[in-house]
Image (cartoon, coloured by chain):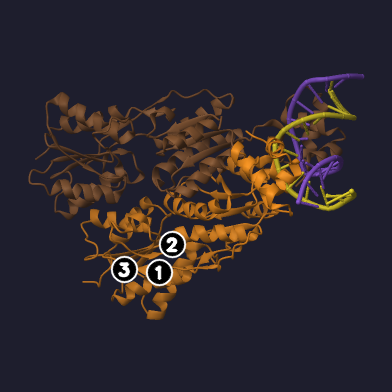
Chain colours: A brown, B orange, C purple, D yellow
Amino acid sequence: MTSLEEVARRAEVSAATASRALSGRGRLSDATRARVQRAAADLGYVASAAASSLATGRTRSIGVLVPLVDQWFFAQVLDGIATRLAPLGYDITLYNATDDPAQRRHLFRTSLRRGRVDAVIVLSLAMSAEETDELRALGLPIIGLGTPILELATLRVDDVAVGRAATEHLLGLGHRRIAHIGPAYPRDAGGDIPTLRHRGFVAALADAGVESAGFARADFTIEGGHRAAHELLSRSERPTAIFAASDELAFGAVFAARELGQEVPRDLSVIGVDGHDLSGFFALTTIEQFPHAQGMAAADAALAAVGEDVTAPAPALPFELVVRASTAPPT
Amino acid sequence: MTSLEEVARRAEVSAATASRALSGRGRLSDATRARVQRAAADLGYVASAAASSLATGRTRSIGVLVPLVDQWFFAQVLDGIATRLAPLGYDITLYNATDDPAQRRHLFRTSLRRGRVDAVIVLSLAMSAEETDELRALGLPIIGLGTPILELATLRVDDVAVGRAATEHLLGLGHRRIAHIGPAYPRDAGGDIPTLRHRGFVAALADAGVESAGFARADFTIEGGHRAAHELLSRSERPTAIFAASDELAFGAVFAARELGQEVPRDLSVIGVDGHDLSGFFALTTIEQFPHAQGMAAADAALAAVGEDVTAPAPALPFELVVRASTAPPT
DNA sequence: CTGAAAGCGCTTACAG
DNA sequence: CTGAAAGCGCTTACAG
């Protein structure tokens, strides 16, 4: 690859001047600037990332820490992040947080500390207290998004309000036997996302003076929703509506209902959370939370934190009830 | 962050010796090595990526070029790549190829040329001839996976065989009115994936002396499959079976059939390709192609190409027919 | 076995 | 406005 030196030689200036001409920092005559830019273009010059970051201490790269399993949400958010980063010339370094303890230790203790990024965006990742500390010790801006860890969540949706909105939609349709599916540990005092959504569910029911028709724990997967819904729907007093803490859980519930010969929404109303790509095909009523826009917001927050001229987004992320055919009044 | 200098000082050796002790290159006494390693551990030293890559010309990072829209396949493959890269201490730099011409130009002309990666893996990406040239001009090992561009595909599934296997499965069940859905342009002499699968479809039918019951073009999306299947199923002589070039296309076909009051597999058999996460829930018969393993293979190919002690994978990727309830003999 | 020195390719005070 | 020089933090021949 061409070096600055070669560009400078071709433009008949020093490397220092060539650097200034290309970066736009420092004043120099329009003529030389033009000459250097021409030379750079002719030679197809692109500055070496390693050399500039060694010299400036800035990498122009943002780290994104994700559990790659969470495919849908993560792909959306990542695309949103890339959308904002690309125009400013920032790259994405992707760090995959698996469940493997050794790999995870290496990630937090080594990979992240190589100085490869200017900031890190943490996506929907549960972390130990130690890991959170190690993240902080990086001395880099950390942007949390969809993280159960409240202290890290720079940007968040009001998940209590989400739980409330979903439940109130069902109440508004006339349902009185409403169950909830999600990864929450209801006894938990914690502020993680599933628990907050569950709390919204409980609060809405309490306000309406309606009793819960049950709660079944399930991870954020279709399988989880499937199993949990099976359990709820085979009880003697089964619910007429289910609020699932995610769309994938809701899909699982729809599959379960179908298997049990129950029709949605005639026999069972189902509402999810996310605005998953497939929710339209399942005709699923959901609380859309715009993950693509969330990614853009996270990127903006990161860029603002590293000093780019970008206005930092508001920390509160929007959500919106989208009504489709999976919810209807009970029959 | 701590520098090598500080480690050297603490271990009472020169920076050169400290570097050798930590890298394992060059011979030095066990005692000093131990002393240095201890010092490094005490200080939590991690070498600066920028400095080492400037000094060695190696970045220990692999670029992955993807269209982020292809969520499912891409997340699987990426996870496979990360699985192999992490243990060897390689990072992933993610490059998102959008449809925006300006962004794309910047990606190929600038981002990729910053010298940030030692090799690049190109995932399921259609590129112009110019872009392919620019990739080659990088002077880096390029590993193509699921790329329509044959010259770039270091690793590939035999897609003609895939098309054949799917079609023969349907023929074997007794179907004689089999249609195909996919992104192929059948008149094309090209060797891109959809066209190869279509070719397998045609060949299998020809071998069996059976006439095609139609082909409907559709991109690799659920929507596409939905629309295409609608078209095929509303013809006067409608097919009894559909071979969809991907599982998502197949899901769309299943939704379409359902809307038209046709039951799968009683009125229509559907087979896809991929082994998508959701295929189990749709009870979809499919040609599984193990994308996670594909990612691992791509990573191995990249690592071998940059000189790591990894055995390069065989270029031919396996696939396997998985029979579920969406296919049955015609009634 | 170990150290001094040069070099990787930029950037940026410091002079002029 | 422009250049010479130092420095970013490593690595690696080259000596000894």
**Of the numbered discs in the image, which one, if any, rests on residue B320?**
1
* Callout 1 crowding tier (Cα within 10 Å): few <14, some 14–19, many ≥20: some
- Picture coordinates of residue B315, whole percent (x, y): 56, 67
Write down the quadrant of residue A239 in the picture.
top left
Q: Amino acid at mark 3?
A: Val
Q: Which residue is mark 3?
A: B323
Q: Residue reaching furthest front? A: B31
**Of the numbered discs in the image, which one, if any, rests on residue B302?**
none
Earlier residue among tags 2 and 3: 2
In this view, B236 is above or below A193: below
In this view, A50 is above or below B176: above
User: Which residue is drawn at the image coordinates 58% and 38% (left, top)?
Assistant: A113
- Picture coordinates of residue B73, whole percent (x, y): 44, 54
Q: Nearer the viewer, residue A62 or B265?
A: A62
Q: Is residue A294 left or right of residue A58?
A: left
Q: Amino acid at mark 1?
A: Glu
Give me the chain letter of mark 3: B
Label pair 1/2, CB-CB below 8 angstroms = yes
Label pair 1/3, CB-CB below 8 angstroms = no
Separation of disc 1 and disc 3 at Cα? 10 Å
* Callout 3 crowding tier (Cα within 10 Å): few <14, some 14–19, many ≥20: some
Query: What element does badge 3 sit on?
Result: loop
In this view, B72 is above or below A21: below
Q: Which residue is mark 2?
A: B290
- Picture coordinates of residue B13, whole percent (x, y): 74, 41
Q: Nearer the viewer, residue A204 or B218?
A: A204
